[in-house]
Image (cartoon, helix red, strand yellow):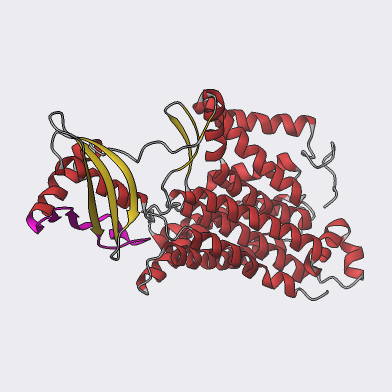
């Protein structure tokens, strides 16, 4: 088989733009710290109406400055500011622990800070008293219906990227071997656990920056997904030589259950959550008081998913590995006659598919904070539906199917009863299997298709 150097180097191609995107958000103000600091303002100005003007990073480490206006009924408005300093930052669990507070009049005492934290900020009254973010930004005014639809589409970006990457994993394996691996949802959970481990190692090394922690988690997720995907896939697909696909399918169900229990024992039944990062709201448009927003982490998640998808397309089109994969998928016997090593190609494909699943798990943790040992099942099932809808065995079809399923879920949740969403999705799968079993980019008949 031709040399596969570009294939071996593809994860490093992913790290450059991903790290640049992560680092680009490093100077943003932490939304959780901003909320805690804002919550203290009503207690500092009893009876006043608080209007937050802007929030900036403070001059000292782990601090932010909130500039606001306090309006009392019997006097003119006062422009004030509060400087809040926290115990940690980034991915550290204690990043929302307020350890110092100062105003234009000077720092408040330790005793006052203690009572403020424990008897106001940490109470339901303190949470309800949060005066909110600064006034609406100067953004384009659009109709109410358009603003609502735009917000739904923006919110669907991370989920669509996750489905697309998991769908590609199914397509890679099925396109080469004609077999479906039902354990990709659990491989995503493995990637999620590896992401938390990588971030924890960065914290243990004294580095709490989100960019560093998530980059370490990205590397760990790619490695763990590739390793578990290759090992599990060889046992359930590579070593089962039966002409029927049923033994392999049943074996992958066993692999799914094994990985689920394996994760439960390794990471415990309790899900470890990462603190939210880059969760401040970026305004995009408005309709009256309704503001369409996008969070930086959503943009990062969608961008990493898009770049990984485009990189995979490049790998499949312009590398010896991709050429060998397409040749073997079209005609395995002819490809072997031309020197393609089928066994090695299968291991590489399983590792690449596992890495895609691990990357999707990393994106789930980055976006939503965590993924339990059994949390990957639903993601894997819906990604399988996406792969079938797009044309299972086709890489572009899998990506298109992921986008289609993500948009379907988003639009159904926005305009129709959300409790019927999954039922409608499974019904749509039945319709596709009846009228177009080859999927969007496949053929009408369930036969080998162009890969």
Q: Tell me where residue 177 sits by quadrant.
A: bottom right
411 or 115: nearer the viewer: 115
Q: Which image quadrant: the N terminus?
A: bottom right
Q: Residue at x 74, y 75 (%)?
A: 5
Image x and y of residue 435, in percent: 79, 30
Q: Residue at x 45, y 67 (%)?
A: 212
In the depicted structure, whether residue 123 falls above or below residue 333: above
Image x and y of residue 239, in percent: 71, 65
Is residue 200 highlighted in magenta? no
Q: Is residue 323 left or right of residue 117?
A: right
Q: Is residue 171 left or right of residue 109?
A: right
In the depicted structure, whether residue 271 falls above or below residue 136: below
In the depicted structure, whether residue 346 falls above or below residue 261: below
Q: Tell me where residue 20 sits by quadrant.
A: bottom right
Residue 257 visible in rendering: no
Q: Which residues are magenta?
A: 86-111
């Amino acid at each position: 088989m031709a040399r596969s150097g570009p294939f071996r180097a593809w994860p490093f191609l992913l790290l450059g733009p991903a790290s640049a995107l992560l680092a680009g958000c490093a100077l943003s103000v932490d939304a959780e710290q901003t909320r805690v600091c804002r919550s203290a303002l009503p207690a500092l100005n009893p009876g006043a109406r608080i209007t937050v003007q802007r929030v900036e990073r403070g001059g000292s480490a782990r601090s932010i400055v909130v500039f606001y206006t306090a309006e009392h009924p019997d006097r003119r408005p006062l422009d004030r500011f509060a400087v809040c300093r926290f115990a940690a930052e980034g991915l550290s669990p204690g990043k929302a622990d307020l350890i110092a507070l100062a105003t234009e009049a000077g720092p408040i005492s330790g005793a006052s800070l203690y009572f403020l934290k424990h008897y106001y900020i940490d109470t339901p009254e303190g949470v309800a008293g949060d005066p909110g973010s600064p006034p609406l930004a100067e953004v384009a005014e659009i109709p109410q219906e358009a603003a609502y639809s735009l917000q739904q589409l923006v919110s669907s970006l991370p989920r669509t990227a996750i489905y697309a990457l998991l769908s590609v994993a199914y397509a890679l394996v099925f396109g080469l071997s004609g077999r479906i691996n039902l354990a990709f949802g659990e491989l995503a959970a493995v990637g999620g656990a590896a992401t938390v481990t990588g971030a924890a190692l960065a914290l243990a090394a004294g580095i709490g920056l989100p960019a560093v922690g998530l980059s370490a988690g990205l590397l760990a997720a790619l490695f763990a997904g590739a390793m578990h995907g290759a090992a599990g896939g060889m046992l359930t697909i590579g070593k089962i030589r039966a002409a029927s696909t049923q033994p392999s399918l049943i074996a992958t169900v066993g692999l799914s259950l094994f990985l689920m229990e394996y994760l439960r024992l390794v990471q415990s039944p309790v899900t470890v959550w990462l603190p939210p990062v880059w969760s401040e709201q970026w305004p995009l448009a408005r309709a009256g008081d309704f503001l369409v927003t996008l969070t930086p982490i959503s943009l990062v998640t969608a961008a990493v998913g898009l770049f990984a998808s485009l990189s995979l397309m490049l790998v499949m089109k312009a590398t010896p590995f991709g050429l060998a994969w397409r040749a073997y998928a079209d005609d395995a016997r002819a490809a072997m006659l031309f020197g393609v090593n089928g066994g090695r190609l299968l291991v590489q494909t399983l590792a690449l598919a596992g890495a895609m699943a691990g990357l999707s798990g990393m994106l789930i943790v980055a976006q939503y904070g965590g993924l339990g040992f059994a949390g990957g099942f639903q993601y894997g099932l819906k990604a399988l539906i996406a792969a079938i809808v797009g044309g299972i065995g086709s890489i572009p079809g899998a990506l298109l199917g992921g986008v289609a399923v993500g948009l379907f879920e988003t639009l159904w949740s926005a305009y129709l009863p959300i409790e019927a969403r999954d039922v409608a999705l499974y019904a749509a799968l039945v319709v596709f299997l009846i009228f177009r079993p080859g999927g969007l980019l496949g053929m009408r008949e369930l036969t080998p298709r162009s890969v």
